[in-house]
Image: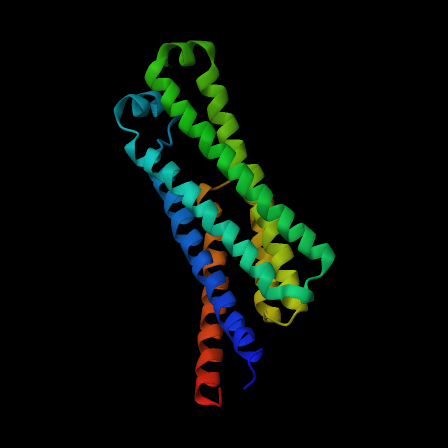
Amino acid sequence: MTETSVPSRRKALKTPRSAAIAGIIFSVLYGASMVLINLSLPHDPTAFLAWLEADTTTVTLALNLIPFAGIAFLWFIGVIRDLLSDQEDRLFATVFLGSGLLFLALTFIGAALAAGLLSSYVVESSVLVQSGVLTYSRKVIYHVFNIYAIRMAGVFMISLASILLRTGLMHRGWAFLTYVLALVLLLSIDYSFWVTLIFPGWVMVISAIILIRNLHTQRNEDTGEI
């Protein structure tokens, strides 16, 4: 084996594995934060103030997980682009990168608004309630998280599935399933909070497929001449 082939092989092995690990970390952290928030927040609007007065520790923990999930997601995007390299379609690659960054930015904005609202309520609870800022902020946070950010996630799914399908890295059936799930995110997110878990679940499956293929490729190459 020549000297130039060793770094090439190492890159081929490490890059997909890095994407898989980053995707799994994002899926676990983001999914956990969404579940914690949904389980903690009262579904009855009249009970929201009582909840704020009681204990918001769980939601605070969930919000603190989001920055780490965002770091992993950014790494996932970068490694996927490096994996595709010259095979990237410029149109889909632009939509893939843009929608991913928009999803990340909107998620961070929503988390920051929620954390700011919780902190402000501790200091000036009466002002927030009487001025209507509390109600307004809740609506804004809901729209940022559950409408704008998650719809960008749907666009991200469509663009990445299209890229992987064109490059032969994704089975056609799985690509079509991805399109259906993405349409659910784009069209029906208002009806159920739990629909938001489609995105981290999808990233988890994609990451698992990448990891399994990577391990399979490494096993085959290890049995041959290196």
Considering depth in this image, is 38 or 217 the residue closer to the camera?
A: 217
- Residue 83: percent from left, percent from top: 58, 65
| Above-or-below relation of 130 to 179 | above
- Residue 197: percent from left, percent from top: 45, 49
Identify the residue at the far left of this view: 54
Residue at the image position 47 percent from the left and 42 percent from the top = 192
- Residue 24: percent from left, percent from top: 42, 58
From the viewer's perspective, tell me whether residue 51 is left or right of residue 85.
left
Residue at the image position 73 percent from the left and 57 percent from the top = 90
| Above-or-below relation of 176 to 71 | below
Considering depth in this image, is 219 or 146 the residue closer to the camera?
A: 219
Type of colouring = rainbow
- Residue 118 shows up from this direction: yes
Residue at the image position 27 percent from the left and 28 percent from the top = 55
- Residue 222: percent from left, percent from top: 44, 84
In the rendered image, the quadrant that contains the N terminus is bottom right
From the viewer's perspective, tell me whether residue 61 is left or right of residue 140.
left
Identify the residue at the far front of this view: 3
Considering depth in this image, is 135 or 167 the residue closer to the camera?
A: 167
| Above-or-below relation of 224 to 49 | below
- Residue 190 shows up from this direction: no
Identify the residue at the far right of this view: 91
Residue at the image position 47 percent from the left and 16 percent from the top = 133
Numbered circles on residues, count: 0
